[in-house]
Amino acid sequence: MFDTLQDKLNKAIKTLKGQGRITEINVAATIKEVRRALTDADVNYKVAKDITDRIRDKALDRKVLISVEPGQLFVKIVQEELTELMGGEAEGINIKGDPAVILIAGLQGSGKTTFSGKLAAYLKKQGRGVLLVADDIYRPAAIDQLKVLGEQVGVEVYAEPENKNAVSIAQNGISHARKTGKKIVIIDTAGRLAVDEAMMQEIEAVKRAISPTETLFVVDSMTGQDAVNTAKTFNDRLNFDGVVLTKLDGDARGGAALSIKTIVSKPIKFISTGEKMEALDVFYPDRMASRILGMGDVISLVERAQQAFDEDEAKRINAKMRKNQFDFDDFLSQLQQIKKMGNVKDLLGMIPGMGKMVKDLDIDNESFKPIEAIISSMTPKERARPDIIDGSRKKRIAAGSGTDITQVNNLLKQFDEMRKMMKKMNTMQASGKLNKMMR
C-alpha cells in the first residue's frame, strides 16, 4: 500500500545522506519534499505540516548537527515521528466480560463481514469460545456470507433471518452465547452511510441496548482521506473504541493510516489484507513506520510464521533436513504452510531491503499452482527419490500437471540445488564452521 510514499520519502531523505553535516538549508529542502510526499499520499495537510515541523525542529537540534552521519539520524527522527503519528504503541481490544461483546460498524462495502470472520478466527486461535451474530437485516446475502465464513473458521453463527429488528437480534445473540458458554460475541451490523439518519439511529440503539465491551469501526483504506472524514462523523455518533483498516493490499496511498489517529483521536487496532481468514494483523505503529521507510518488518514476519507453522511438523522437517532426507512431500508441505501466512509479495516486503526489489514484480500465491501441480503429478516413489525421474517420467508429469517439460526440469534443478545447499549447511554445522560464522 505504501509503495509510492516509500519511494518519495526515500528520495527526499537521500539528499541528506552523504552530507557532511545538516544545515538549515538542506533540512528545509528535505522537509519540503517529505511534506509533499505525505500530502501526495492523501495525508491531511494540517497533519503533514505538524509532523514535518516537528521533524525539522528535531533535525536542527545540536545533537544531529554535530553527527557524522546526519542522514541516518534524520531517518530515525522520521521513523519516530511517523510512529507517534500513527498512535505510538499497539492497543489491544477489550475482551473482558461474560461474554465480551464486540460491535462491528462501518460503511457499506468496507469489509465488515469479512473482518468479523477474520477476527473470530484470530480469537479462536487464542483458545477462546467465539460466537458470530449476523445483525445485518438489509443485505440478503449478508447472513449467508457470515455463515460461510463461520464454517471456514469453525465458529458458530447466530442468525434470525425473519427478524427485522437489529436490536433484538443482537440481544438474542448475546443470550444464546451465555447459554452455550461462548466467551466472546462478535456482532456484524449492516453497512450504513453517515448521512442516513435512520440507520445511524439504529446502530446507536443497538449499542445502547447491548453495551459492548468494544466497538470497532471498519474503514476501507482505499478511500483515502474520505475514510478519515467518515470515521470522524461516525465517532461523533458512536464514540467507538478503535479503527480497523481493510484492503491494505490494494492500490491505496496510505493517507488514512497516517491521518486517522490524529483526526479521530482513536487508535488503529487491526489491519486487514486480502480475503483469506489468516490475513489479519494487530496494528503496530512502529512496525508500520519501519515498513514505510523500507526497513522491513521482521517481527511481524516471524509472528506470522509462528501462527502458520505446526511445531511438530517443523521438528520433523528439521530432522529430515539434518539427515539430508528432505523430499518433495516435505517441500509441498512447507509450500502450503507458507501460503497460510498470506500474500507472498507482502511477506517479502517485510524483509529489510526487499520491499523495493519486489515492488514491480507480479508475485502472488497463484504462482505456486504449477509447482504444486507438478509435485502432485509425481508418484510417491518419485517424490521421495527425484533422481529416478528420467525423460519418460518427465513427459508423464508434465502432461499430468498441465505444464511442459521445461517447467518440470526447472523445478527439479532448483530442488536439487536446494538439497545441495542443505547438505552443505549440515556439513558446516557438523564441523563447527557454521557456528563460527553465526558468531
Image (cartoon, rainbow, N blue to C red):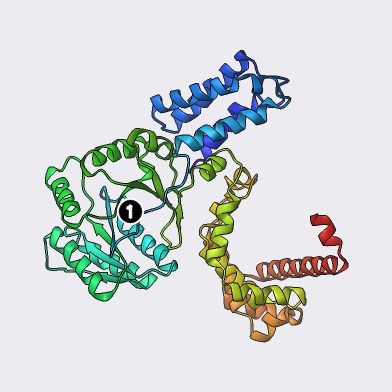
Residue at x-position 49% and y-position 21%: 53
Rendering coords of residue 7 (x, y %): 57, 35
Rendering coords of residue 172 (x, y %): 17, 67
* Vertical position of residue 399 compared to residue 231: above or below: below
* Vertical position of residue 25 compared to residue 35: above or below: above
Q: Amino acid at mark 1?
A: Gly
- Residue 82 as seen in the image, left or right of residue 233: right
Residue, far top: 25
Residue, far front: 97
Q: Secondary structure at mark 1?
A: loop
- Residue 378 as seen in the image, left or right of residue 122: right
- Residue 29 as seen in the image, left or right of residue 147: right
**Residue 403 can be seen in this image:** no
Q: Which residue is mark 1?
A: 111
**Residue 350 can be seen in this image:** yes
Work out which quarter of the rendered image holds the C terminus and state it.
bottom right
Rendering coords of residue 189 (x, y %): 23, 56
Rendering coords of residue 141 (x, y %): 23, 63
Q: Nearer the viewer, residue 85 or 258?
A: 85
Q: Which quadrant of the view contains residue 302?
A: bottom right
Would you call the spot at circle 1 few (<14 residues within 10 Å), some (14-19), or many (20 or more)? many
Q: How many numbered circles does the render carry?
A: 1
Residue at x-position 56% and y-position 31%: 78
